[in-house]
Amino acid sequence: MQDLGDAFGLAISLVATGDGDLVEIVGLSLRVSLTATALACLIGLPLGALMAIARFRGRGLLLILMNALMGLPPVVVGLMVYLHLSRSGPLGFLGLLYTPTAMIIAQTILITPIVAALSRQVLEDLHSEYAEQFRSLCLGPLQSVQALLWDARYSLLTVGLAGFGRAVAEVGAVIIVGGNIDHLTRVMTTAIALETSKGDLAMALALGIVLLVIALGVNAAVYSVRMTAVRQAYV
């Protein structure tokens, strides 16, 4: 195992020089997580909006279920996706297991309930303010959803960023369905676990530094979006 001081110095060098393996791992991580976040937003935002404005029998039960799914254990999601994509599973003929696509599917399932539940809360609060105005304008459900999504765009952007932060830091599901294959499905979190177990602290620390920078960047972006929304509210 490397000396901690030497490992940290080498880690800084790997980041500063743009080590090829490091860049490849980070690039795949961002591609998988950004794609999963985009898909989760495409599914979760309209679903959250519909749940915010709709009133029907069983809505309370669906809200409880939606909130409960926010805490889905990643390894359970990974296992379910694995069982469906394995050769003996119903989708095994697609040959997606141990590919980036399988990782995207797992992350999308994992963060869609988060996006839907958070956006539902934001849009329901907004809808309570605009309900009378929507009724006076005779807006249908689709038009109401479109208006809410546009008016809450800054708040919903923070929801999307929260989903991305959850996705990029996930390890349990992606290691099950991706297999942590070098140059194919190795992302930052799975590579950190592997390199640490191998005693290669330099690469693990380098990836950890990049992951921390991304986390800080996401939080800074969330703060910036919130401040922009506040300024827009007073214009």
Image: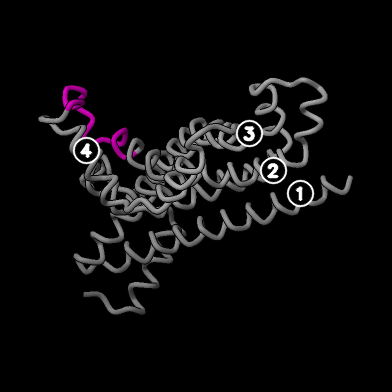
Question: In 3D space, how far apart are the residues under numbered discs 3 and 2 (Cα atoms)?
Answer: 19 Å
Q: Quadrant of the N terminus?
A: bottom left
Mark 2 and mark 1 in contact (Cβ < 8 Å)? yes
Return the residue nearer the eye: 31 or 81. 81
For residue 154, which numbered disc appears in the image?
A: 2
Residue 54: x %, y % from top left = 59, 32
From which residue to which does the magenta span run?
A: 90-103
Q: On screen, 225 above or below 148?
A: below
Quarter of image, res 120: top right
Question: In 3D space, how far apart are the residues under numbered discs 4 and 2 (Cα atoms)?
Answer: 36 Å
Return the residue nearer the eye: 45 or 10. 45
Please name the residue that numbered disc 3 is placed on. 53
Please name the residue that numbered disc 1 is placed on. 228
Q: Quadrant of the C terminus?
A: top right
Label 4 secondary element: loop
Label 3 secondary element: helix
Q: Earlier in the sequence, mark 1 or mark 4?
A: 4
Label 2 secondary element: helix
Q: Earlier in the sequence, mark 1 or mark 2?
A: 2
Mark 3 and mark 4 in contact (Cβ < 8 Å)? no
Q: Given this view, does label 4 or label 3 mark the residue nearer the observer?
A: 3
Q: Quick check: 192 left or right of 61? A: left
Question: In 3D space, how far apart are the residues under numbered discs 1 and 4 (Cα atoms)?
Answer: 41 Å
Tell me the amino acid under the disc marked 2. Answer: Tyr
Residue 47: x %, y % from top left = 52, 33
